[in-house]
Amino acid sequence: MSDVFIAFQDNEDSRPIIEAILADNANAEASYPTGLVKINAPTNLVIRRKSIEDLIGRSFNLQQIHVNLVTLSGHIDEDDDQFSLSWTH
Amino acid sequence: MSVDIHTREMRPLRNTFAHTAQCVGNDKPASRYQEATLGTQPTSNFHYRPTWDPAHEIFDASRSAIKLVDWNVLRDPRQYYYATWTMARARQQDAIEASYEFVESRALIAKMPDVLRAKVCQVLMPLRHVAWGGNMNNSSIGAYGYGTPFTAPAMFHAMDQLGAAQFITRLGLALDEPGVLQVGKKDWLGDARWQELRHYVEDTLVLQDPFELFIAQNFALDGQLYPLIFGSYVDDHVVPQGGTAVAMLTAFMPEWNGESARWIDAVLKTAAAESADNRQLIAGWISTWADRAQAVLAPVAELALGAQGQQALQDVRENLTQRCKKAGVVA
């Protein structure tokens, strides 16, 4: 199975999102192409609202990730609490 | 001839300012909150001592009996610095504006029973003056406290208190004629049921220790007043009687109180964890001020909730005790 990935603009708003993803996905790896942060992970990757909220100490709406989201690959499964990418149906 | 444009990645050698790196290291970029807050307290090369307080430097940690090796530890879990704080409050302001539009377009206030409307004014209007006291006190913490992580959120909190006072004022103007504000002030100055609370507020205005003031105002008083008034009274008592509009128009207060409680608890927890002396001081201040706040709120609880007032106040006090336990201040 190929990797899934997600990339954000490398800025202050993305920082807690990136940190949350790296904490929640042990196999995820971040790379830093110019101006971006790209996170690759084998088979699946999950973004949890709770993890981001713990980092920023405020409430967070997962739709806010779209402000700085640049690109992604994988099938999306999302609800209010999590946003996940994988190749399974 | 063709021109190839390449991008080349440049990694910065330093991830943050040196004074921020002293607190959080240079391994990864520091957040804006860290850069705006940590290590920004002026500590040396002061000019002469203030003529109004020659015993202290202009910024002096010894104004408080609480002792911390590094005042940068009292961090705000909400990570508010000017930008995040203003954006959060602007969103809340928009929400309240939308509520006003909703309430006014459907004339919800006119549909409230007159007796209830008068009662709400009677209970809420004097609270403008309590919030103003909170504004003064948090400004004082901002001025005489030590360490930006502690004083900056206190200054934000001072402005929030002013916001709360303005929302109460605006509610009064929506519910009744402007004279209702004068009646509220008269009650605050003359009505026996408000005098003990006024005494408490006026006593805190002259507290010298910024940390004790922080406890007396933000933890002991607001920690009971807001859940009592905007929880037990507005949400549980006024709303079932047809006063939904009041809950909508005061939605900021309980929301803000819950949010800022996390900051207040975090400050108490960190300061208490540093030494047994600190914990003892904090526990002593809490028991003194929370007992007194409970006592002065008793007539207000009765005014608002009648016979159920004392039980509601007791529940609120128990909640405060739970917060103390969670913060590790008392066993």
Image: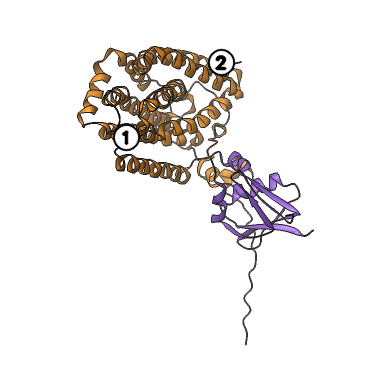
**In the image, what residue occupies the spot 52% across and 16% down?**
B318
Q: Of marks 1 and 2, which one's residue comes earlier in the chain?
A: 1
Give the numbered dot on residue B166.
1
Q: Residue at x 32, y 18 (%)?
A: B198
Mark 2 residue type: Gln
Q: Residue furthest right?
A: A1
Vertical order, A56 against B111 (above or below) = below
Q: Which x, y percent locates residue B246? A: 35, 31
| Secondary structure under the numbered disc 1 in the rendered image | helix
Closest to the observer, A75 or B6:
A75
Of all chains, the one bearing label 1 is B
Kindly identify the amino acid type of the residue bearing the numbered disc 1: Gln
Vertical order, A49 against B194 (above or below): below
Left/right of residue B193 with respect to residue B279 in the rendered view? left
Residue wearing tag 2: B280
Label 1 vs label 2, nearer the camera: 1
Whole-percent x and y of residue B29? 61, 50
Which element is circle 2 on? helix
Specify whether residue B58 is in view: no
**Residue B153 vs residue B229, the one in the foreground:** B229
The chain painted orange is B
Left or right: residue B275 versus residue B156 is right
Q: Is residue B177 above or below residue B314?
A: below
Q: Which color scheme did the rendering employ for the protein?
A: by chain
| Chain rendered purple | A
